Image: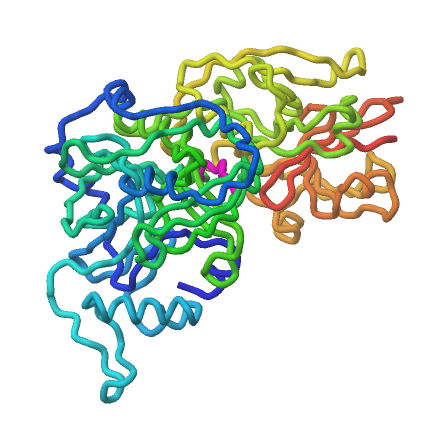
Amino acid sequence: MKNQSWKTLAFAGIGLLATAAPALAEENKETKDTPKLSAVEFNAKITKNSEEVHNAGPLVASYADVVEKILPSVVSISTYSKKQQGRTGAPGGFGSGGEEDMEGLPPMFRQFFEDYMQKHGGQMPNPNSPKGRKAPRGPQGPQQTGLGSGVILTADGYILTNNHVVEGADELKVMMGGQTKEYIAKVIGTDPSSDIALIKIEGTNLPHATIGDSAKLRVGDVVLAAGSPMGLDQSVTHGIISAQGRSGMNIIGSNKGGQAGYENFIQTDAAINPGNSGGPLVDVQGRVIGINSAIETRSGMFSGIGLAIPINMAIGVVSDLLEGGKVQRGFLGIEMGNVEPSMAEYLGLSDEVGGVTVKTVVENSPAAKAGIEEGDVIVTAEGTKVTDPSKLRLMISSKHPGTEVKFGVVRFNETTRKPERKDLTAKLEILPDKLNASIFEKQGGNKGGAKAGGFIEGVKVQNLTDENRQEYAVAEGVEGVLVTGVEENSAAAKVGLQEGDVILQVNRKTVKSIAEARANKGEGANAVQLKVWRDGQTKFLVVKN
């Protein structure tokens, strides 16, 4: 683990140094023995309360009643590995336990791991031993590799936690507060894309939490975070909801199929530290409204910004895991981007809030079948204003395949030379297991000559050749007209066109040469709409004549 990984974001779980091998690929063979429970049966077992939190008026002097209500359902989760190799790629994980791993930790974290491993029999270098020798690493049974938290959802032992808490573990042990008994837990299902996991212990009449409604939360609501920070079980901290809908933080990484994670975090200033991962975030009535997951930090410890997964999102994921073994997410088939100011003005959206630009439409996708086109700006989905790409992506992914979604789009009509509003309905399909940038790329190359020219005032362009493609690092398969110069203070420069950009479309029509670009621009138009490629990304710009 490198130092820089602690500068911004850290998972709130503790990964010990003899980290677990990626054995969950085998899906914990014991789970096959667990009776299958349908999502309907599971939800019937959960205690729910979706009433709004009301302002109690005077300042509350104690939350002891709330704490007594939630703590019995909060558990500590210890992970164990039968192998001694490092867990590569696991969020918040560490390497093989060598000195390099220790050097990568902040000093306060390093001391904690040394103390913890000494107390629990882990393998650690002993700087006071002769010549600094390390303890032998022979076969000694499963080694503890991580600590986290969880919350019991049902009386028969279903526990909600984070995927990164259990990922890679060969064995899971659960302890309930105030008890010395250890339960062996089985993994029922995991979803790395949302960082949610469902595990189960055997038991009856177990204390279980009441589930709230995260859709009714408000910024400023008082919350408490419970769990086992730094291995100190049954700990509770207090704060408020600082913000909602935090996304695009790249905390939940891409899965094996190349798809980025789904983030919609609740932000809180209730202290969350390593070991809190998977524990509940509760409201003042003791209802679970989130699952503690990560912190933003420069030190590896809490610095005032904790992040939790909304409980509505978590329960939705768990229901899918129980129903079909994996989460069934909707797929629209577009690549999205923010609306550039020039594009907003061109389409008369200056007074609109948000919206996303459709940069690419996948062939034969639900979007293509619905009539959505490149260059469209989606302003509403299901009657709700679209504010940014991450929110729209999250909304689409939360729908099941086969769901019909109505979109409001704004498109520039080249015949009337005016923007127009369209309502289009797309029937979502299942999100492919493997989805990456290649699905949006169009293959083929342009071998046209390098004749320089221009079709926009203040802009120099060339047809793409092997030579200038290499000079400007233009990827193979990108076709269009290369921008080789943009005059300072020109209309094109003011909207963000840059040297090295590749113009893919002019007025919504694909171009492969300067001649096609000039023809598509037309005569007498007040503005020209460009789709440009830059460093692997595309965007739409509008240049006024």
Q: Return the x and y of residue 462 as percentages of the image width and height.
A: 74, 42
Residue nearest the observer in this picture, 89 or 235: 235
Q: Is residue 262 magenta?
A: yes
The quadrant of the picture occupied by the N terminus is: bottom left
- Left or right: residue 269 versus residue 487 is left
> Would residue 453 be found to the left or right of residue 256 on screen?
right
In the figure, 530 relative to 500: above or below? Answer: above
Q: Quadrant of residue 74?
A: top left
| Residue 336: percent from left, percent from top | 58, 31
- Side of 132 relative to 472 (left or right): left
Give the residue drawn at x 54%, y 11%. Answer: 425
Whether residue 291 can be seen here:
yes
Identify the residue shown where x is 56% and y is 15%.
382
Up the image or down, 16 lies above or below 35; here it is below
**Quadrant (top left/top right/bottom left/bottom right) for the C terminus:** top right
The mark tally for this picture is 0
Q: Is residue 342 magenta?
A: no
In magenta, the rendered stretch is 261-267
Which image quadrant for residue 132? bottom left
Q: Nearer the viewer, residue 299 or 30?
A: 299
Q: What residue do we see at 21% from left, 47% from top?
A: 174
Residue 27: x and y in percent read 20, 40
Residue in the picture at 53% in, 42% down? 240
In the image, residue 395 lies at what x, y percent? 50, 25
Query: In this rendering, would 421 be left or right of 169?
Result: right
**Up-down: is 519 above or below 404?**
below
**465 or 534: nearer the viewer:** 534
